[in-house]
């Protein structure tokens, strides 16, 4: 069984993340979405809220599970029997960071491969931080995140 881990902060999950989850779930048997408990980034939502949003917005996908984790991503992959780490790649911003992370993870474990999926055209400039910024400034975020997250996000920001 081919298992993969898609790790991230998901603060909150965006349509770009969901696109990666949908596409990755078609190429592996089981996809584990790993929500990092304590990020180096300051998060707007706590880990329970972030997990809850992932669960609610991906429930139609049958071969995924959602976990929380802390510590090294490779260790979480090994612990969960996942040999692949999935990451999303926006051409304008992610290459350097993602390639460095992939190399670090390769150094930490030879048995784990990082697989980067290119972000779809519609989501190339979409990030959780941009959604929060635009939301805070009163812009339209309805095409960036699932509907159920809009209200809680605007409530938190304001
Ligand atoms: P992290 O703190 O691990 O970067 P994020 O939640 O910001 O957590 O992102 C998780 C993964 O999803 C990363 O690989 C990131 O590049 C990818 N990602 C984020 N936004 C998009 C998007 N719009 N399209 C494709 N991939 C994305």
Image (cartoon, rainbow, N blue to C red):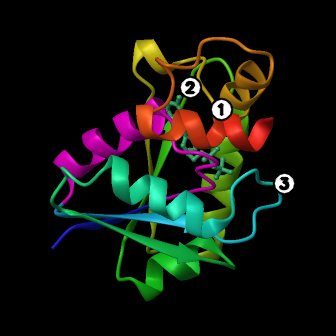
How far is mark 3 from mark 2, CA to CA?
22 Å
Q: Nearer the viewer, mark 1 or mark 3?
A: 3
Q: Which residues are magenta?
A: 7-28
Residue beneath the point at 70% across and 23% down: 135
Residue beneath the point at 45% across and 26% down: 119
Q: How many marks?
A: 3
* Above or below for 35 versus 157: below
* Above or below for 103 versus 70: above
Is the residue at mark 1 in contact range of ligand 1, meaning its CB lies under 8 Å from it? yes
Q: Nearer the viewer, mark 3 or mark 2?
A: 3
Q: Earlier in the sequence, mark 1 or mark 3?
A: 3
What residue would you read off at disc 1? 94
How far is mark 1 from mark 2, CA to CA?
5 Å
What residue would you read off at disc 3? 42
**Spot occupied by residue 80 in the image (x, y as percentages of width and height):** 39, 83
> Which mark is on residue 90?
2
Q: Quadrant of the C terminus?
A: top right
> Do labels 1 and 2 touch, CB within 8 Å?
yes
**Spot occupied by residue 132 in the image (x, y as percentages of width and height):** 72, 31
Q: Does dot 2 land on a helix, a strand or a loop?
A: loop
* Above or below for 92 versus 153: above
Question: Magenta stretch containing residue 27, yes or no?
Answer: yes
* Above or below for 103 versus 35: above
- Most foreground residue, 157 or 119: 157
Would you say 115 lies left or right of 59 here?
A: right
Is the residue at mark 2 in contact range of ligand 1, meaning its CB lies under 8 Å from it? yes
Residue beneath the point at 59% across and 71% down: 73
Residue beneath the point at 66% across and 76% down: 72
């Amino acid at each position: 069984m081919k298992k993969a881990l898609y790790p991230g902060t998901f603060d909150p999950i965006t349509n770009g993340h969901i696109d990666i989850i949908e596409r990755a779930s078609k190429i592996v048997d089981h996809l584990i979405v790993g929500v990092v408990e304590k990020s180096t980034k300051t998060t707007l939502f706590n880990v329970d809220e972030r997990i809850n949003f992932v669960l609610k917005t991906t429930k139609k996908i049958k071969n995924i599970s959602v976990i929380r984790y802390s510590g090294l991503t490779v260790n979480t992959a090994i612990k969960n029997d996942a040999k692949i780490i999935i990451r999303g790649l926006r051409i304008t911003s992610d290459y350097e960071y993602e390639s460095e992370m992939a190399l670090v993870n390769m150094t930490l474990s030879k048995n784990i491969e990082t697989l980067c999926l290119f972000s779809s055209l519609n989501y190339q400039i979409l990030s959780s931080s941009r959604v929060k910024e635009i939301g805070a400034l009163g812009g339209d975020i309805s095409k960036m995140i699932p509907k159920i997250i809009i209200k809680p996000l605007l409530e938190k920001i304001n």
